[in-house]
Amino acid sequence: MLAVLQHALLSPQLHFSDIQTFRQQFMLGSQHYSNAVNAVYLGAQSATPGMAFLAGYQNAIRCLDVNCPSDELAAFCVSEKGVKKPWDMATQLSSQGAHKVLDGQKGYVMLMPNELDRLYVVAKNEEGQLCCVYLPSNSLGVSATEPLKAPFVEDIPHSGVSFDQVEISPEKLLDIDGHQQANKPFRYWEDVHVALAMLGWVLREQIESGKSLQELSGDIQMIEQLNESFEESPDYYTLGSIALLDQCHEMMDVGSKNVSESAQKLWMKDRLLLQMGQKIRHLVRAKLTR
């Protein structure tokens, strides 16, 4: 992991204004590293927590679909305005001749409308079960809408998305349960990969402020532990991974006190994103300890 971080730290910082460089670095990392290590690699190159989030998020999507091309940026579309339970979502996948069609709206889609290549969408099929389909973001019948408001990662654009009779060919329907194998585990994949990328960002910011890699050995060890934990349990949370994620977030809060004033302001705003995962971990911990 140390070699990966050293390589990343020698690279220019990644800004959204140069998203093409991010694409190139993502492809490069995907060729050499696992999804988890690639999240660290890109996170340590990120200029903002928002870019680190994007790095973690893109690698988490590759856990959903290992065949998602590394030269495409993708989004996982679940949230709908006013819907709290997955089974209440209104987005529908219905049959129309030899094909299926997708109708509905999703409220928060990263990189929509101009920098997104592929959408993964959780919808309800005709049997009332949740499924997951993928499609190009420029498909006929796909359009951007007003997004759900979020007080973080403001440097990364997002939008809502509407689907109007979007044709879905059979090969674009993933052979998985839309909740048990997509929506539910994605929370875990995103939690881990975003934490790894954010740890990389906080580490770089501390170095920019005068810390040495030797002084940050505890941070590096925490990154290695979270990576190893994910390798041991890649599908869903364990009590051990939950405890480790909580420790990672505490370490980032401590580390954020050693960064520049501008970086600290970004962190104080964007750390709210991590707190959303904290609520999920609390619920999962309660279930695992019953």
Image (cartoon, rainbow, N blue to C red):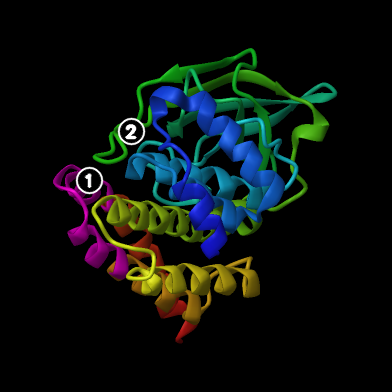
Magenta span covers which residues? 251-271
Q: Please name the amino acid that badge 1 sits on.
A: Ala
Residue 250, horizontal then vertical, whole percent = 28, 70
Q: In what element is the residue under mark 1?
A: helix
Residue 240 sits above or below residue 62 on the image = below
Q: Residue furthest left?
A: 261
Q: How many marks?
A: 2
Q: State the residue at coordinates (43%, 75%).
A: 244
Please state which of residues 169 and 124 is positioned toward the viewer in this rendering.
Answer: 169
Residue 277, horizontal then vertical, whole percent = 38, 59
Residue 115 sits above or below residue 152 on the image = above
**Which image quarter: residue 99?**
top right
Q: State the residue at coordinates (69%, 53%).
A: 177
Q: State the residue at coordinates (43%, 35%).
A: 14
Residue 158 placement, left or right of 130: left
User: Which residue in the structure is indicated by mark 1?
Assistant: 263
Residue 260 colored in magenta in the image = yes
Residue 40, horizontal then vertical, whole percent = 50, 55
Please state which of residues 35 and 287 is positioned toward the viewer in this rendering.
Answer: 35
State the mark number for residue 148: 2
Q: In what element is the residue under mark 2?
A: loop
* CA separation in Å, label 2 and label 1: 26 Å
Q: Is residue 153 in sight in this rendering? A: yes
Residue 193 placement, left or right of 278: right
Q: Earlier in the sequence, mark 2 or mark 1?
A: 2
Q: Please name the amino acid that badge 2 sits on.
A: Leu
Residue 114 placement, left or right of 61: left
